[in-house]
Image (cartoon, rainbow, N blue to C red):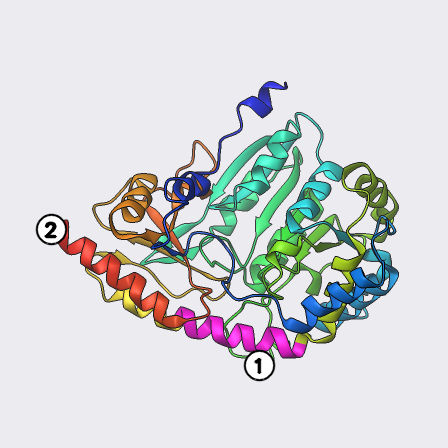
Amino acid sequence: MRKIIQSLAGSQIREVVNSAIDRPDILKFWFGESDEVTHPAVRAAAMTSIEAGETFYTANLGLAELRESVAVYMARLHGSKVNPIGTSRIAITSGGVSGLMLATQMVVNAGDEVVCVTPIWPNLPQQAIIMGAVVKAVPLYAEAGEWKLNIHKLCEAITPFTKLLLINAPNNPTGWTLTRGEQQTILEHCRKTGTWIIADEVYERLYYEPIDIRNPHGCAPSFLDIAQPEDRLIVTHSFSKTFLMTGWRLGWLVLPPSCLEAMGKLIEFNTSCAPSFVQKAALEALRREGDITPPLVKHFKLCRDTLVPLLQALPNVEVQAAKGGMYAFFKIKGFDDALSLAKRLVSEVGLGLAPGSAFDLAPVAIGEGWMRWCFASKDVERLAEGVGRLESWLKTQE
């Protein structure tokens, strides 16, 4: 076995989950998914496809009709005369995480330097590490619970020796979201250094700013709004969050057209193709996007606006409502070991949260002491109950 594989760190979130996996009393806010099931019509489309016998291999890059539908969807959100988005830029992948791994395989050689904005979902930097890259962290910083980026430090870290920048915005776990100005600065700097960008934008529709001239389609700023088709940019997406399809494992990439043929080969060598009936379900999800996504975003905003004020009302809690994503990232004064705190909350009051340290890249420990609470709950009363459990527990620690 390769030494780098032996040295990979296990998931701290799974460590917390495994400590109480059989307990029915746990309020589970630890994973990044809603507790609401996939839309009935989407599930029905998959069953219809299976009943029709559509259980065979498909094209490496995905069904033509799905790629076309994704291209139309992305063009509606981001396409322009400057940056046309068509099927020549779309590859369907077996989940967003597979898309990220494929993008990393396409770009990274052993020994390459990769820069990563942290805290971040650990799969992103670990994929580069698996490829043999040297990954450097540029941390966000918190002011009164609001997360921000020092754009000058990021640009200083990205040099002509930097092969790849990994960036996730809206961010998991903090909810931090890039501004258009920051994106423009990053893109122009990476053009000068010849650095690739892999932008994980799976949470772009989970964006809670008012819909206006700056946000006409109800989505966070995207690199696709400002990039040229042949820029060294790969944007990853997933049906998981926006369409309530986490378990279906389907995503897509937006690539430079010149990379598409090579990506088809990579998909062949990794998964061959995504299942046909899952792709048919995704087609139905895109057809019903207006019935699924806007109500979902409205509900998630209600969840955010229910949870965050309740947390803010607790003594010694530092938290702000994030502009995007599906998480409240908060800190309790006096509790600096996030993993220990997460295990205690599960064990002692049945509250399942993710430790912020799970999103760090050693040796930078910016997430230590913070906790991630996924607020994507079908029932907002569960959020209030969870805060009640936390409040009661904190009183016992006084």
| Quadrant (top left, top right, bottom left, bottom right) of the N terminus | top right
Label 1 is placed on what type of residue? Answer: Asp
Residue 170 percent across, percent down from the top left = 54, 59
Residue at the (57%, 81%) spot, across then down: 212
Tell me where the magenta segment starts and ends, as one range. 290-304
Which residue is nearer to you in this view: 10 or 4? 10
Q: Quadrant of residue 309?
A: bottom left
Mark on residue 212?
1
Q: Position of residue 39 (x, y in %)?
A: 63, 71
Q: Residue furthest bottom?
A: 212
Amino acid type for the residue under numbered disc 2: Glu
* Relative horizontal placement of residue 109, taking residue 203 as reference (left or right): right
Considering the numbered disc 1 on the image, is that residue within a helix, a strand or a loop? loop
Dot 2 alpha-carbon crowd within 10 angstroms: few under 14, some 14 to 19, many 20 or more: few
What numbered label is drawn on residue 398?
A: 2
Give the residue furthest to the left: 398
* Any part of residue 223 in sight: yes
